[in-house]
């Protein structure tokens, strides 16, 4: 952000994303699209919806979650993110091997 030690505001991130999308001719984009894309791709590689919701910080409002379940799901989150990281790395490596990496600048 502009102030040392302070994060960027959501409006600053939206504006930056908007400028980037115009520069690379992406017709419509909001930062929320990243959350939707991640959730869809993570589901496609077998990550359970419950763990995807927990990773995205969604609140669980059912009686069991609110009143009884105090587990932090840290190990489950780690396993899920390890699976995601390995999938993403394999995808990038495959694209590099096939020379399909998109060059956005220069």
Image (cartoon, grey):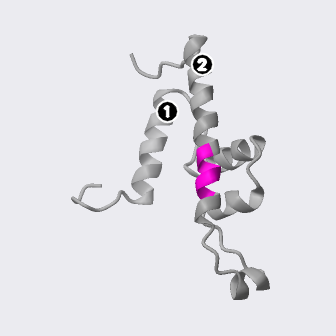
Q: Can residue 46 be seen in this view?
A: yes
Disc 2 to disc 1: CB gap under 8 Å: no
Please, is residue 63 above or below residue 40 in the view?
below
Say whether disc 2 or disc 1 marks the residue closer to the N-terminus.
1
104 or 27: which is nearer to us? 104
Tell me if residue 91 is in the magenta stretch: no
Q: Nearer the viewer, residue 19 or 95?
A: 95
Front residue of 46 and 57 = 46
Q: Please tell me whether residue 79 belongs to the stretch shown in magenta.
A: yes
Secondary structure, mark 1, is helix
Q: Where is residue 63 in the image (x, y as percent from the top left)?
A: 78, 85
How far across and down, in percent of the image, does residue 4 sit? 21, 58
Residue to which mark 1 is pinned: 22
Q: Most prominent secondary structure in the magenta stretch?
A: helix
Residue at the spot 23% in from the left edge and 60% down from the top edge:
3
The residue beneath circle 2 is 95
Res 100 → quadrant: top right
Q: What stretch is highlighted in magenta?
A: 77-82
Q: Which residue is drawn at 77% across and 45% down?
A: 46
Q: Which of marks 2 and 1 is in front?
A: 2
């Amino acid at each position: 952000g502009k102030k040392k030690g302070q994060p960027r505001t959501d409006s600053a991130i939206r504006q930056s994303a908007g400028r980037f999308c115009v520069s690379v001719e992406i017709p419509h984009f909001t930062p929320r699209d990243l959350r939707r894309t991640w959730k869809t791709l993570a589901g496609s590689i077998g990550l359970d919806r419950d763990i995807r919701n927990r990773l995205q910080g969604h609140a669980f409002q059912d009686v069991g979650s609110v009143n009884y379940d105090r587990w932090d799901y840290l190990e489950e989150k780690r396993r899920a993110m390890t699976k995601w990281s390995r999938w993403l790395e394999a995808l990038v490596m495959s694209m590099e091997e096939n020379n399909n990496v998109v060059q956005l600048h220069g």
